[in-house]
Amino acid sequence: MEERSQPIIIKKKNKKHAEHHGGAWKVAYADFVTALMAFFLVMWLLAMVAPEKREALAEYMKNYSVFQASGTSFMDKTSQVLNQPDKGFRVSPQDLSKGSGGGGLTAEELVKKLKKAIEEKLTSVKNQVLVDIVEDGVRIQIVDAEGGMMFPSGSSEPTQKAKDILKIVAENIQSVSNRIAIEGHTDAAPFKNAQTTNWELSTARASAARRELERNGIESSKIARVVGYADQELLVKEDPKDPRNRRISIFLLHEKAPAS
């Protein structure tokens, strides 16, 4: 007799996992690894930045003031330092005017000199004069404030306060041989009459600042450019009508390296 084959029975057992494995540490570890990766990514990116741009970024962070820069984002400024293309200035901020017969001041020394003069002679408006180092060179910004206008509304004639500031600036940059750029800026409030817009007004104010500098001893041959930007380069981007957007910017430009 043939034996009957027994059916094969497969039993599946469902294993129940424990509901709690104490996995909170895994989340913390994942966060740590992510942060570590981000840190090394930042270090790698900084290593890829040109030395002069790293120096400019370091100088900006060293001099950054939350009080002076209220309403602005420091990220906007640092990204400008890192991402602006090379504009032909091949020396670092520390080499401003060094060895050029301009008094031998470094950019840092000039900034300290200007801030000290403003602190001593223009105490009442010291918060309206911002001095820092940017990629182009040393920047001096003369800004409006509530109750402290540098130009009467709609006018390109500087107030006496603005003239006093420009006189102090001129006295402290006369010994520097670097060329000078002057920019005029307005806020975003529309200003328009038959022939004038914010473009004409900002340009006229920049030119008025140039005349004041020349009146106080700055040679006209040192002026590299005078331009108006209307409301296209806001200082306080979060509030286009902030009075601090109405300003004059004066740049002592880095000297170009001689052509080889």
Image: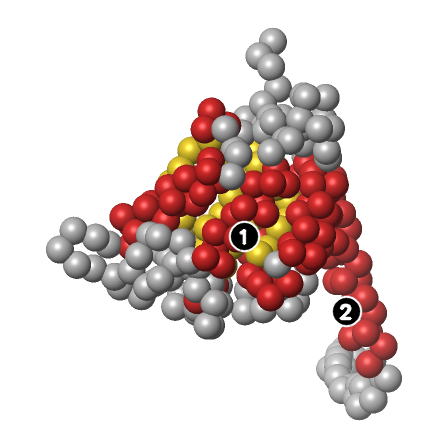
Location of residue 147 in the rendering, given as x and y in whole percent from the top left corner:
46, 72
Q: Which residue is mark 1?
A: 165
In the image: residue 72, left or right of residue 182: right
For label 2, the crowd category at 10 Å Cα-Cα, with few meaning under 14, some 14 to 19 and many 20 or more, is few
Which is nearer the eye, 191 or 123?
123
> Identity of the amino acid at label 1?
Ile
- Above or below, 185 relative to 216: below
- Above or below, 214 relative to 149: above
Which is nearer the eye, 74 or 178?
178
Point 17% across, 59% down: residue: 193
Circle 2 — which element? helix
Disc number for residue 31: 2
In the image: residue 69, left or right of residue 248: right
> Identity of the amino acid at label 2?
Asp
Location of residue 172 in the rendering, given as x and y in whole percent from the top left corner:
63, 41
Q: Is residue 153 visible?
A: yes
Which is nearer the eye, 102 or 77?
102
